[in-house]
Amino acid sequence: MTPSETEFEDTPLIFIIIGEARMGKDAPLQPFNALLAAADDNSAAQIVLESLQQQGYSNADLHQIGNLDDRPEDAVLLEAYNTACAGEVALIFYRAECEKSN
């Protein structure tokens, strides 16, 4: 085995989930990305939903789920990736774009 193959085997399976969540019934949806290590898609989705609930979010829509094959180059995603590799759930929330007034 080459060193890169060994490094790849030591890296946990990292999922990225794209979705929206809200704090309360009438609150607006906030877009987010979640990065985490999990055994499979279903486990990853369940862990993210539980993490959102612990943060006070009452409702969430999960739009996409996938795996990260490589370390991200973007600094924010790289920090979240490292958090996920350490066994924690990284939640990144984005501000909704403001509507343009005419």
Image (cartoon, grey):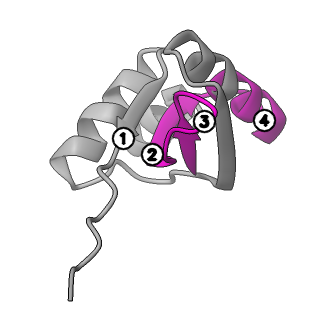
Q: Are marks 2 and 1 in contact (CB under 8 Å)?
A: yes
Name the secondary structure under disc 4: loop
CA gap, disc 1 and disc 3:
22 Å
**61, 5: nearer the viewer:** 61
Question: Which residue in the structure is indicated by mark 1?
Answer: 93
Q: Residue furthest right?
A: 42
Q: Amino acid at mark 2?
A: Phe
Name the secondary structure under disc 3: loop
Of mark 2 and mark 1, the one earlier in the sequence is 2
The residue mark sitting in front, 4 or 2, is 2
Which disc, if any, is residue 8?
A: none
Which disc, if any, is residue 32?
A: 2
Q: Amino acid at mark 3?
A: Leu
Callout 3: 10 Å neighbours few (<14), some, many (20+)? Answer: some
CA gap, disc 4 and disc 1:
23 Å
Question: Which residue in the structure is indicated by mark 3?
Answer: 13
**18, 36: nearer the viewer:** 18
Of mark 4 and mark 1, the one earlier in the sequence is 4
Q: Amino acid at mark 4?
A: Asp
Of mark 1 and mark 3, the one earlier in the sequence is 3
